[in-house]
Image: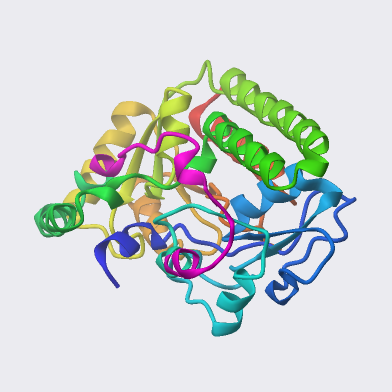
Amino acid sequence: MNVRRRRISGIAVTAATAIGLGTLSACSSDSSAAGNTDKFDVVASFYPMEYLAEQIGGDHVNVTTLTEPGQEPHDLELSAKQTAQMGEADAVLYLKSLQPAVDEAIAQSGVKTKIDAATLTKLEDHGNVEHDHGGEEHADEHAEEEHSEGGEHALDPHVWLDPVKYAEIAEGVAKSFEKADPDHADDYRKNAEALAKKLSGLDTAYKDGLKNTATKVFFTNHAAFGYLAERYGLTQEAINGLDPESEPSPARIKELQEEAKADGVTTVFYETLVSDKTAKTLAKDAGLKTDVLDPLEGITDKSKGDDYVAVMESNLKALETALGAK
């Protein structure tokens, strides 16, 4: 596995089956349905894209996902059938550079409407947060990667964890749907406005909930929350940058122990479907608690909520508790 994919693979959970709006009975997670309905057929690469397609498309779309429950999104390999079905869809919604196999298949497909979420907002490089702690070997690997690939993959893909940036993507998706399926443009616009209100409400809840806290620092097993931290004035400290399931060095553990005391850190966060061994090692040695902060790459029965908004609200409660919100 190459450096880039190792860097983000630990936050991967799974993709969801169809969720959210009770009216979306037509939505399906069975990719074999793509292109075979009378609706506007949309193929989504993984859960955050699927959620947008369902919310904006409403009753007019048939949404399928390439990443099935139990699959690791970043290292997804597509079957020949999935690739063929993608070519029959009316639109495909994805986040370029997150899933190389998907990028390749889309480039070769004849899909008329290709919506790359990475072009609908500004991605940023939060890599320095991770690589500062990765040791010389990891830093050298990353430098070599940037040199060979122009630094493209240094951009943090976890943009959906910032409700404001996610809303920017949603607006762009809605415009693409309106253009590709003009007969239902008014409904797409209305649905997008309703989604924008949900995301604005979520943003307000985060601003209010995290405005006055005992500390602004939180520890994560892996640096997936750079956009969220930046949006709400927090500092994310990752135990491991490149390989979230590796053991942290004694020096790194000591460094984090000292920082926990200095900054009043109470909790080490880990992710539902990623090993909690590293987080618990640090927590035990530093006398800290552990809790889950969900990177929302999929909804499973272990998720603390049924859809994007519900899980983000759960994440907010976890952060409020850990940071000592007043």
Question: Number of numbered discs present?
Answer: 0
Residue 250: tell me if it is visible.
yes
Q: Is residue 117 left or right of residue 113?
A: left
Camera-nearest residue between 209 and 94: 94
> Residue at (61%, 18%) from the top-left corner?
208
Q: Which residues are magenta?
A: 104-129
Q: Is 116 inside the magenta-drawn segment?
A: yes
Q: Is residue 304 visible?
A: no
Is residue 165 in the magenta section? no
Q: Nearer the viewer, residue 203 or 108?
A: 108
At horizontal 59% and vertical 26% (from top left) the residue drawn is 206
Residue 39, image quadrant: bottom right
Quarter of the picture containing the N terminus is: bottom left
Q: Quadrant of the C terminus?
A: top right
Q: How is the image coloured?
A: rainbow
Q: Is residue 251 left or right of residue 300?
A: left
